[in-house]
Image: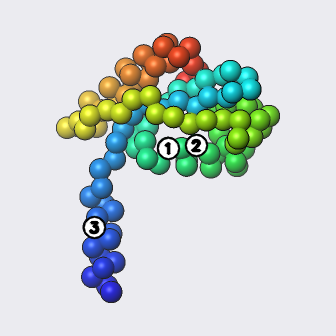
């Protein structure tokens, strides 16, 4: 049983995280927000958690959540980045692609 736990921990540590750009939309107001994340698999949960707590740093997104609730917002992926050798290259690409999607979708940055 201890071996299973160790194997599970090792597998968790070795999992690949996929970086990319995500979008949050409010159907009622038509507002759009774009953000970047080092791990797309976990960013929606983190974003929704801070919104539920009323502590999201993006005031306009928090206001939309407060006005329309979770059902009023949708979450989606814009783009996944290829795995990069270094964090520096990945972060530079994230920044560049986020600016692209922000302009493309006429969105506010998260």
Where residue 15 appears, x then y in whole percent? 30, 55
Q: Is residue 33 left or right of residue 3?
A: right
Q: Secondary structure at mark 3?
A: helix
For the point 75% across and 40% down, the residue is 69
The Cα–Cα distance between marks 1 and 3, rounded to whole angstroms, is 22 Å
Between residues 105 and 92, which one lies in front from this camera angle?
105
User: On the image, numbered disc 1 is attached to which residue?
Assistant: 43
Q: Earlier in the sequence, mark 2 or mark 3?
A: 3
The Cα–Cα distance between marks 1 and 2, rounded to whole angstroms, is 6 Å
Q: What's the image's color scheme?
A: rainbow
For the point 68% across and 21% down, the residue is 30
Mark 1 in CB contact with mark 2 (< 8 angstroms): yes
Mark 1 in CB contact with mark 3 (< 8 angstroms): no
Q: Tell me the quarter of the picture where residue 19 sits.
A: top left
Q: Secondary structure at mark 2?
A: helix
User: In the image as oriented, which residue stretches furthest toward the left?
Assistant: 85
Is residue 20 depicted above or below 4 in this figure?
Answer: above
Badge 2: residue crowd in 10 Å (few <14, some 14–19, many ≥20):
some
Q: Tell me the quarter of the picture where residue 32 sits.
A: top right
The Cα–Cα distance between marks 2 and 3, rounded to whole angstroms, is 27 Å
User: On the image, numbered disc 2 is attached to which residue?
Assistant: 47
């Amino acid at each position: 049983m201890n071996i299973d736990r160790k194997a599970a921990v090792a597998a968790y540590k070795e999992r690949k995280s996929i970086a990319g750009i995500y979008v949050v939309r409010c159907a009622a107001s038509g507002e759009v927000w774009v953000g970047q994340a080092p791990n797309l698999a976990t960013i929606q949960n983190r974003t929704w958690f801070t919104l539920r707590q009323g502590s999201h740093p993006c005031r306009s997104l928090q206001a939309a959540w407060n006005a329309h609730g979770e059902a009023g917002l949708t979450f989606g992926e814009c783009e996944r980045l290829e795995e990069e050798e270094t964090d520096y290259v990945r972060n530079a690409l994230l920044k560049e692609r986020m600016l692209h999607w922000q302009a493309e979708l006429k969105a506010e940055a998260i």
